[in-house]
Amino acid sequence: MLFSATLSHRVLELAYEHMNNPELVRIEPDKMTVDLVRQIMYYPAMEEKLPLLIGLLRLYEARRTMIFVNTKRVAERLESTLKANGFHAQALSGDVPQNKRLKFLRDFHNGDLAVLIATDVASRGLHIPDVSHVFNFDLPQDAPDYVHRIGRTARAGTDGDAISFACEEFAVSLPEIESYLGHKIPSLPIPPELLQQKSPPPRRANMAIVHVLHAREDTRDRVLAGALLQAAVAPLNLREPGSRSLTDSTAGMSP
């Protein structure tokens, strides 16, 4: 017997391929989505998505908030940006080791981790109670995934909010999602005050300059590379108290 909360066409093909005359038993929910989920749609431009997300997270004082994205790359970039803006966030993608995965989920369940960023693959089979807000930073490309995502909130008789961004890249999925739901998702205009200025994640030191520092023998080249490196890393405050910075190696050199 094969049990699954969701069955995509590909999984059904595999099931029929490896099982002899299987019978499909499907239990349909009485309603496609829970009444207690408040659904809202925003229509941001691509460059507005991150500022809008940060503004909404601050407005809602994010706690036990899930953010869904479509790719691991976006999940990791979002984690770095949210951390740089003061949010305790972690990305949960398909290749996160099991021990880290369990720790993230435990911290999220205990309230120690405020924001969990996930792809659809990574979130399959998770049962996390008391999720207050679900964000679709990227609209899913399959309509059933939308229902699966927003079903993370408003469980066990509680209410919850599902906020989605229909940007120009993923808005193409919206008609199919609304057709699947059987109704239009309410939308709101974006107040300018919600578009908060975001702090970029820390940059990495320019490794090309570091390579020049170590590879070049000529003193002039080392001094020039050291000056360039110092300019590149000065805003990052990379030096720890009591330690020498990489650029200290050029101090006192004369051309």
Image (cartoon, rainbow, N blue to C red):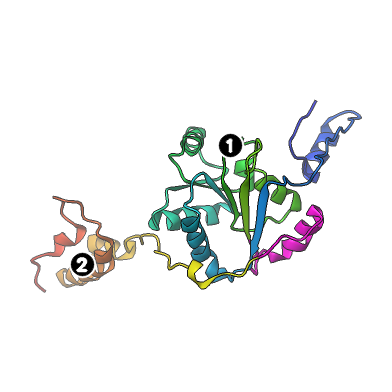
**Where's residue 172, x and y in %?**
72, 65
Residue 210 falls inside the magenta stretch: no
Q: Residue at x 86, y 32 (%)?
A: 25
Instruction: Relative to 88, say whether 40 is above or below.
Output: below
Q: Amino acid at mark 1?
A: Ile
Mark 2 is surrounded, within 10 Å at the Cα level, by few (under 14), some (14 to 19) or many (20 or more) other residues, namely: many
Name the residue at the right extreme.
Answer: 21
Q: Residue at x 39, y 57 (%)?
A: 84
Instruction: Relative to 95, say whether 179 is above or below.
Output: below
**Where's residue 164, x and y in %?**
63, 58
The foreground one among 117 and 244 is 117
Q: Amino acid at mark 2?
A: Gly
Q: Which quadrant is home to the N terminus?
A: top right
Instruction: Relative to 46, say whether 118 is above or below.
Output: above
Q: Residue at x 19, y 57 (%)?
A: 245
Give the residues drawn in magenta, as a range.
165-187
**Where's residue 122, x and y in %?**
60, 42
Q: Which residue is mark 2?
A: 226
Q: Which residue is mark 1?
A: 128
